Amino acid sequence: MTNILILGGTTEARQLAGKLAARADLAVTLSLAGRTESPIAQGVPVRVGGFGGAQGLAAYLKETGTALLIDATHPYAARISANAAEAARQAGVPILALRRPGWQPVAGDRWTLVDSVAEAASALGTAPRRVFLAIGRQEAGAFEAASQHHYLIRSVDPVEPKLTLPDAIYLLARGPFPETEERALLEKHGIDAIVSKNSGGEATYGKIAAARALGIEVIMVRRPSVPDVSSAETVDQLAAKVDHLFEPVAERGV
Ligand SMILES: NC(=O)c1ccc[n+]([C@@H]2O[C@H](COP(=O)([O-])OP(=O)(O)OC[C@H]3O[C@@H](n4cnc5c(N)ncnc54)[C@H](OP(=O)(O)O)[C@@H]3O)[C@@H](O)[C@H]2O)c1
């Protein structure tokens, strides 16, 4: 058996794990950070929690005899991606990354590009606005510095403790979020600015398309830089790279 560790926390990581697990000769483990309280079933063995930096991950790779590390984390999870590249180097294990391409602005989009969530908070300006925060809960605290705005804050898990914002509505939801529903949400709350990460993919693009249709500004936080390792843009392309490294023997159950 060939042991493969997938660093996950994304839909693609789950899909890739399922695809690779269909091969009888691969033993796939999926790793989650443990941020989400009730993660959806992943369909393969899962381990949860940090490794203790690059060194900890390198030690894990050696202890478990992992033959391939796959970084399929979210494009904004920059620390684990850096750790993965360094750990693979230290442990002498090959690494592949699944790097979902970012969205590109098209005609009609009103994007303001910023380098960080903190910069997004100041880019909203001084006059009160009605803001849809769609960046997850971890960095929502940065908007306490811009408490003059009304906020609609959407996250998978509750923002705890609640932010010191006088005018905020919290919405718990897990994607995918279709454009028609996003449009209805923006209209219902009279939103005039959206703060978003450039996540790429279809599941969360609905708000971007809806913003375009409604002429709403999107404050887009640029992607952090990640290490330059061998990568693929889609689950199928990455699975093909794995097949190239470890030629399939047979499908499970065949
Ligand atoms: N950032 C986002 O916008 C976003 C959005 C959707 C999903 N996610 C997912 O949420 C998780 C955490 O994201 P983040 O932005 O907090 O990451 P991060 O800042 O890059 O990572 C912080 C620390 O969390 C641990 N960690 C992160 N991902 C891990 C994984 N898959 N398995 C085991 N440990 C992991 C590592 O701890 P140690 O150093 O102790 O190993 C890492 O140093 C990731 O799995 C990511 O794919 C993030």
Image (cartoon, rainbow, N blue to C red):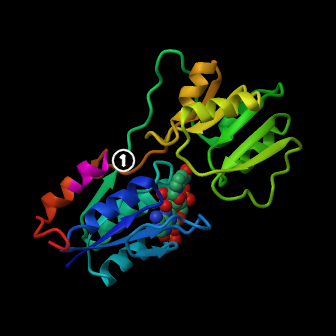
In the picture of the structure, the residue carrying the numbered disc 1 is 99
Report crowding for label 1: few under 14, some 14 to 19, many 20 or more residues within 10 A (C-alpha). Answer: many
| Local SS, label 1 | loop
Question: Of 227 and 168, which appears nearest the observer?
Answer: 168
What amino acid type should be assigned to the residue bearing mark 1?
A: Arg
Figure quadrant of residue 14: bottom left
Residue 230 seen by the camera:
no
For this view, does 25 lie left or right of residue 12?
Answer: left
Could you say where residue 120 lies in the image, as x and y percent from the top left?
A: 66, 35
Q: Residue 151: where, in percent of width, then height? A: 78, 39
**Depth check: 97 or 48 in front?**
48
Residue 70 placement: quadrant: bottom left
What residue is at 36 percent from the left and 57 percent from the top?
15
Q: Main secondary structure of the magenta part?
A: helix
- Which residue is more in the foreground, 253 or 195? 253
Whether the residue under disc 1 has CB within 8 Å of ligand 1: no
The residue segment tinted magenta is 234-239
**Residue farthest right in this picture:** 166
Residue at 43% x, 40% y is 201
Q: Is residue 187 magenta?
A: no
Q: Give me the residue at 15% from left, 62% from top.
A: 245
184, 172: nearer the viewer: 184
Q: Residue furthest front?
A: 254
- Where residue 69 sits in the image (x, y, percent)? 31, 66
Residue pictured at 37% horizontal, 72% vertical = 44
Q: Is residue 184 above or below residue 46?
A: above
Residue 252 can be seen, yes or no:
yes
